[in-house]
Image: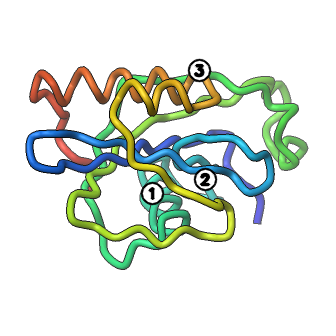
């Protein structure tokens, strides 16, 4: 099944008392740290893809609140094997970002990742490899400080 011409990013966070921690995942294939990332399957919306990818990569056994973020990025289409199935003229794909509240939720990593670390904002930002991940983390951090999360997506 070909994937849709977009990417999603899900930044997991949890509240521990008065503190907030962010999950960063170590990719098995590229040996780098990132948030949950993936593409949409045929017919999926970005919100549906984000919920599915979070369930799959984090081994979630129940639905969690997903909050849309303003952070977007553009990724060159040449990095995706399914590029040939996309409309002619697709040179970049958008990356849509979300936050997932995992307070009191246990993570069971998929085979895509070898480790997870729950970190404060500064340490998580320093560990993340991709600029889009750091931008989404920064937006989420500011929103949490301002108690300004958007309404969760359905």
Residue 32, position as x, y percentages in the image: 69, 41
* Disc marking residue 76: none
Callout 2: helix, strand or loop?
Answer: strand
148 displayed left or right of 152: left
Where does the image place residue 84, in percent across and percent down from the top left? 90, 43
The residue located at (56%, 50%) in the rendering is: 25
Q: Which residue position holds label 2?
A: 40
Residues under labels 1 and 3: Cα distance?
Answer: 24 Å
Asked if the residue at tag 2 contacts the one at tag 1, i.e. Cβ–Cβ closer than 8 Å, the answer is yes
State how far apart marks 3 and 2 are (Cα).
21 Å
Q: Residue at x 31, y 46 (%)?
A: 13
Q: Nearer the viewer, residue 17 or 88?
A: 17
Find the distance from the CA under tag 1 to the CA under tag 2: 8 Å
Query: Is residue 13 found left or right of 71 in the rendered image?
Result: left
Q: Nearer the viewer, mark 3 or mark 2?
A: 3
- The residue closer to the viewer here, 66 or 104, is 104
Label 2 environment density (alpha carbons within 10 Å; few <14, some 14–19, many ≥20): many
Q: Which residue is at 79% across, 42% downward?
A: 86
List the residue tagged with mark 1: 48
Residue 22, compared with residue 123, is above or below; it is below
Q: Residue at x 9, y 40 (%)?
A: 18
**The residue positioned farthest toward the bottom in the image shown:** 61
The mark nearer the N terminus, 3 or 2, is 2
């Amino acid at each position: 099944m070909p994937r849709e011409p977009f990417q999603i990013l899900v930044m997991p966070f949890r509240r521990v008392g008065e503190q907030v921690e962010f999950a960063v995942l170590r990719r098995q294939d590229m040996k780098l740290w990132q948030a949950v990332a993936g593409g949409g399957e045929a017919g999926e919306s970005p919100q549906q893809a984000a919920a599915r990818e979070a369930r799959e990569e984090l081994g979630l056994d129940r639905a969690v609140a997903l909050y849309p973020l303003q952070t977007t990025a553009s990724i060159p289409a040449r990095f995706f094997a399914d590029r040939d199935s996309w409309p002619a003229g697709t040179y970049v794909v958008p990356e849509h970002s979300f936050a997932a509240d995992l307070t009191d939720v246990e993570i069971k990593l998929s085979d895509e990742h070898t480790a997870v670390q729950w970190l404060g904002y500064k340490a998580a930002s320093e560990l993340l490899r991709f600029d889009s991940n750091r931008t989404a983390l920064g937006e989420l951090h500011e929103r949490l400080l301002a108690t300004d999360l958007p309404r969760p997506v359905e």
